[in-house]
């Protein structure tokens, strides 16, 4: 089997599923209950003085 064809078939099936699961996991990670405090702290880093 040609390499391009094999990679294309993988991307069409399992690659799409993997990226979808990664995206859903990233959304859940960002919106979990304890993340607001961490996000607020990260957002205020440029405003802190040394």
Image (cartoon, rainbow, N blue to C red):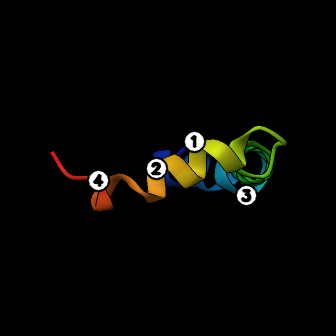
Spatial separation of the CA atoms under disc 1 and disc 3:
16 Å
Between disc 2 and disc 1, the foreground one is: 2
Spatial separation of the CA atoms under disc 4 and disc 2:
10 Å
- Looking at the image, which is closer to me, 43 or 14? 43
Q: Which residue is mark 2?
A: 42
Residue 21 placement (x, y as % from top left): 79, 45
- Looking at the image, which is closer to me, 37 or 11? 37
> Is the residue under label 4 in contact with that under label 3 (CB below 8 Å)?
no
Q: Which residue is mark 1?
A: 1
For label 1, the crowd category at 10 Å Cα-Cα, with few meaning under 14, some 14 to 19 and many 20 or more, is few
Helix, strand or loop at label 2? It is helix
Query: Residue at point 73% right, 58% down?
Result: 12
Spatial separation of the CA atoms under disc 3 and disc 2:
37 Å
Quadrant of the rendering where the N terminus is positioned: top right
Quadrant of the rendering where the C terminus is positioned: top left
Q: Which mark is residue 48?
A: 4
Between disc 1 and disc 3, the foreground one is: 3
| Dot placed on the residue nearer the N-terminal end, 3 or 4 | 3
Single out the residue that lies furthest toward the left.
Answer: 50
Between disc 3 and disc 2, the foreground one is: 2
**Left or right for 39, reference 44:** right
Seen in the picture, residue 38 relative to 31 is either above or below; the reply is above
Spatial separation of the CA atoms under disc 3 and disc 4:
46 Å
Q: Within the image, what quadrant is residue 32 found in? A: top right
> Is the residue under label 3 in contact with that under label 1 (CB below 8 Å)?
no
Q: Is residue 15 visible?
A: no
Q: Which residue is mark 3?
A: 12
| Dot placed on the residue nearer the N-terminal end, 3 or 2 | 3
């Amino acid at each position: 089997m040609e390499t391009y064809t094999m990679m294309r078939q993988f991307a069409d099936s399992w690659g799409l599923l993997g990226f979808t699961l990664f995206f859903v996991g990233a959304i859940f990670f960002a919106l979990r209950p304890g993340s607001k405090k961490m996000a607020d702290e990260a957002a205020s880093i440029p405003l802190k003085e040394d």
